[in-house]
Image (cartoon, helix red, strand yellow):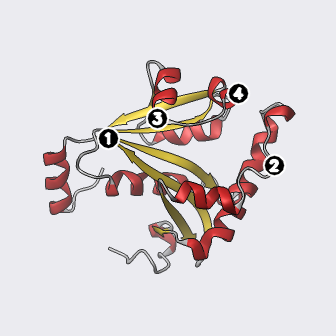
């Protein structure tokens, strides 16, 4: 396995590691650059500019862990993981436009799945209903729309009402804790 703080070989995908306050500015830049895409499908009154500032990043860091994907030692994608009981939320999945469709988002999702605590039985991710890019990567990663998205979003996310009503929740069941521990010990993924 490649240590997460070293760059990955080109064919191995991005290096992924936990982010700290030293990467705050770069992470916020990735988020805001990638979120510019929202202009293509959100009405102007629902756009937030910036999507996130450094104080917002810090506030989110109090309840979740930030993860970064690095290519050639440059931060190119970010996401967060937030455990809530037996559920793990994928939060704020953003990839720089020039690195989209290169496996960065999928690698971040796989990382979240691999590091999920044994107590987690389901992973949940929310996105805008119109965000076909995010929906595509989630579906490719094995996530399916929740039977009652609004209920799932209200249960696990604290988002403004306008964003909630235009969003969809995706869910993925994960191996039972004992089986997941066994797979990790044997080095089996997927």
Q: Which residue is at a point 80% across and 37% down the rendered structure image?
A: 40
N-terminal label among 2 and 3: 2
Look at mark 2 in the image and give the residue it sits on: 49
Measured in 3D between alpha carbons, the distance from the residue under mark 4 to the one under mark 2, in whole angstroms, is 15 Å
Query: Would you place residue 189 above or below residue 10 in this image?
Result: above
Asked if residue 104 can be seen in this view, the reply is no
The reply to whether dot 1 and dot 2 touch (C-beta < 8 Å) is no
Circle 2: is it few (<14), some (14-19), or many (20+) Cα within 10 Å?
A: few
Query: Would you place residue 137 above or below residue 24 in this image?
Result: above
Circle 3: is it few (<14), some (14-19), or many (20+) Cα within 10 Å?
A: some
Q: Which residue is at a point 24% across and 46% down the rendered structure image?
A: 119
N-terminal label among 4 and 1: 1
- Which mark lies nearer to you, 1 or 2? 1
In the drawing, does residue 27 fall left or right of residue 104? Answer: right
In the drawing, does residue 68 fall left or right of residue 160? Answer: left
Look at mark 3 in the image and give the residue it sits on: 156
Circle 4: is it few (<14), some (14-19), or many (20+) Cα within 10 Å?
A: few
Measured in 3D between alpha carbons, the distance from the residue under mark 2 to the one under mark 3, in whole angstroms, is 24 Å
Measured in 3D between alpha carbons, the distance from the residue under mark 1 to the one under mark 2, in whole angstroms, is 32 Å
């Amino acid at each position: 396995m490649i240590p997460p703080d070293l760059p990955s070989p080109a064919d191995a995908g991005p290096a992924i590691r936990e982010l700290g306050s030293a990467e705050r500015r770069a992470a916020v830049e990735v988020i805001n650059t990638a979120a510019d895409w929202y202009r293509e499908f959100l009405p102007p009154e629902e756009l937030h500019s910036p999507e996130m500032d450094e104080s917002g990043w810090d506030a989110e860091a109090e309840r979740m862990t930030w993860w970064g994907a690095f290519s050639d030692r440059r931060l190119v994608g970010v996401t967060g993981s937030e455990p809530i009981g037996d559920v793990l939320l994928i939060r704020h999945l953003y990839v720089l436009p020039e690195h989209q469709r290169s496996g960065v988002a999928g690698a971040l999702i796989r990382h979240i799945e691999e590091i999920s605590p044994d107590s987690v039985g389901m992973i949940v991710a929310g996105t805008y209903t119109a965000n076909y890019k995010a929906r595509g990567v989630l579906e490719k990663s094995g996530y399916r729309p929740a039977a009652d998205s609004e209920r799932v979003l209200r249960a696990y996310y604290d988002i403004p009402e306008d964003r909630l009503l235009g969003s969809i929740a995706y869910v993925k069941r994960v191996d039972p804790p004992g089986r997941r521990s066994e797979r990790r010990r044997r080095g089996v993924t997927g």
